[in-house]
Image (cartoon, rainbow, N blue to C red):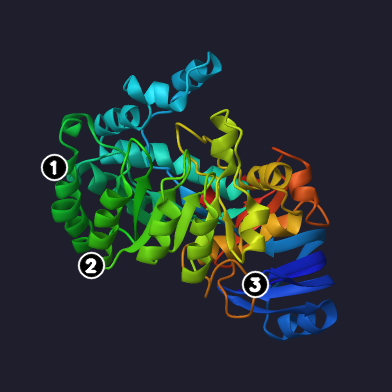
């Protein structure tokens, strides 16, 4: 049955060019896709003719569902001990050198079964929806062998088949060098290129191929090799770029035609210029900067001034950003990247969809788009990042189906 939301205080629909369509005292009609929105009387008349269920939005704000275009939800264990070490002054690199960091998550992931991984992931997916997020990109990268990367991606696929949250899978086999290849990185790269990527593609388990291009992890040349191999097999490039230093990752993203380059805390003007010319999305992850105790946030105003298109993501993972709260990232992007509430909301909706190359159906409420809708427990968008860390979600619809009520998931829908 179609649904018609009435008594909407403000309906915000992000346009392709970074601006907004907005209407007060509006109504929104949808089934699995958006049918119409506009002045309440006109839309309500159409809804009644079509037998739609009429739902009072209670004079609240309505936006598209949020799109979190960079997450790592398929992990085994949290890493709270590492947070304690950072509180004592240890850096991310110090902890990694001691065998912690990503390699710690690899050892934990390898110790559990695929079924156990699915069980641990499902409650995490609930939390995304509770914060108004209806689609996430979901990376592997804690297996670091063909078998274990397949296990992660299979778990992501299984969760996506049973859970209302939509997940777009990414192969991140080049996340770190596993313990058994520490003295022979080239051999591990051979494994990724010649075995892991073909195996993943054969099983149709990923849309993107990602690399952690960073000093001490994978160089520009090594990253290029992996991304070009992924492209050869039909995987769209994405990469972690210029997070801890300017390694040239942004320039590589432009060269390989990546959908997005993510982090970019140290991106150069040349890197920005090349990404803009190539149409690569700038995906900002301020939560990682905050949680790691760093002080260099991406220069969003410079990126926008130079013509860049922004996305905004949580970077949800057990080591550097253990949060599913994308509205909190809007707060950080405002306070530390000088973005307005509307700019952060655009980056977390249409920008996120653009970073996933799914802008045709996600991140906006244009008629024909997928009916992913968030109803906020406030009347205007400034309230979302203003109440930082607090959940302002009232209802969430995914593909037209009510999933969240009063900020909590409906158990029977899982």
Whether tag 2 and tag 3 are in contact, CB under 8 A, the answer is no
In the rendered image, residue 61, in percent from the top left (x then y), is placed at: 78, 60
Question: Which comes sooner in the sequence, label 2 or label 1?
Answer: 1
Question: Which comes sooner in the sequence, label 1 or label 3?
Answer: 1
Q: Residue at x 48, y 51 (%)?
A: 262
- In this rendering, position of residue 189 left or right of residue 408: left
Question: Which comes sooner in the sequence, label 2 or label 3?
Answer: 2
**Distance between the alpha carbons at the discs numbered 1 and 3:** 47 Å
In the rendered image, residue 212, in percent from the top left (x then y), is placed at: 36, 45
Q: Residue at x 80, y 58 (%)?
A: 60
The image quadrant of residue 205 is: bottom left
> Does 2 sit above or below residue 86?
below
**Distance between the alpha carbons at the discs numbered 2 and 3:** 34 Å
Residue 187's disc is: 1
Residue 365's disc is: 3
SS type, badge 2:
helix
Which one is closest to the eye, mark 1 or mark 3?
1
- 390 or 406: which is nearer to us? 390
Task: Assign the N terminus to one quadrant of the image.
Answer: bottom right
- 27 or 285: which is nearer to us? 285
Within 10 Å of disc 3 (Cα), the crowding (few <14, some 14-19, many 20+) is many
Q: Residue at x 69, y 76 (%)?
A: 29
In the rendered image, residue 42, in percent from the top left (x then y), is placed at: 81, 84
> Does 177 sit above or below residue 211?
above
Residue 232's disc is: 2
> Does 340 sit above or below residue 306?
above
Residue 96's disc is: none
SS type, badge 3:
loop
The image quadrant of residue 180 is: top left
SS type, badge 1:
helix
- In this rendering, position of residue 368 left or right of residue 95: right
In the rendered image, residue 290, in percent from the top left (x then y), is placed at: 60, 33
């Amino acid at each position: 049955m179609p649904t018609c939301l009435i008594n909407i205080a403000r309906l915000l629909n992000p346009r392709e060019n970074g601006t907004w369509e907005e209407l007060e005292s509006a109504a929104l009609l949808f089934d699995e896709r958006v049918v119409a929105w506009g002045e309440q009387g006109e839309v309500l008349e159409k809804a009644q003719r079509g037998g739609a269920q009429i739902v009072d939005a209670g004079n609240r704000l309505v936006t598209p569902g949020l799109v979190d275009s960079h997450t790592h939800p398929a992990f085994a264990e949290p890493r709270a001990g590492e947070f304690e070490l950072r509180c004592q002054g240890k850096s991310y690199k110090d902890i990694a050198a001691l065998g912690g960091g990503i390699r710690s998550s690899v050892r934990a992931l390898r110790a559990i079964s695929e079924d156990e991984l699915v069980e641990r992931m499902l409650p995490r997916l609930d939390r995304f929806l509770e914060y108004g997020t209806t689609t996430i990109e979901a990376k592997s990268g804690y297996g670091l062998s063909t078998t274990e990367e397949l296990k992660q991606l299979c778990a992501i696929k299984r969760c996506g088949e049973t859970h209302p949250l939509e997940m777009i899978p990414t192969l991140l086999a080049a996340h770190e060098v596993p313990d058994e290849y520490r003295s022979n990185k080239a051999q591990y790269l051979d494994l990724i290129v010649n075995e892991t990527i073909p195996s993943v593609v054969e099983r149709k388990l990923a849309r993107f191929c990602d690399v952690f291009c960073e000093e001490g992890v994978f160089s520009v040349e090594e990253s290029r090799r992996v991304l070009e191999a992924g492209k050869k097999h039909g995987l769209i490039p994405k990469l972690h770029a210029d997070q801890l230093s300017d390694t040239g990752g942004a320039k590589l993203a432009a060269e390989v035609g990546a959908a997005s380059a993510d982090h970019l805390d140290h991106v150069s003007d040349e890197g920005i210029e090349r990404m803009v010319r190539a149409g690569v999305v700038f995906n900002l992850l301020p939560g990682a900067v905050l949680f790691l105790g760093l002080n260099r946030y991406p220069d969003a105003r410079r990126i926008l001034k130079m013509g860049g298109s922004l996305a905004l993501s949580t970077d949800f993972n057990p080591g550097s950003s253990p949060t599913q709260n994308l509205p909190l990232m809007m707060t950080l992007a405002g306070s530390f990247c000088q973005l307005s509430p509307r700019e952060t909301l655009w980056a977390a909706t249409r920008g996120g969809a653009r970073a996933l190359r799914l802008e045709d159906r996600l991140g906006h409420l244009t008629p024909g788009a997928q009916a992913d809708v968030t109803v906020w427990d406030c009347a205007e968008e400034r309230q979302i990042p203003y109440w930082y860390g607090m959940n302002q979600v009232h209802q969430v619809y995914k593909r037209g189906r009510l999933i969240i009520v009063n900020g909590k998931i409906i158990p029977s829908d899982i």
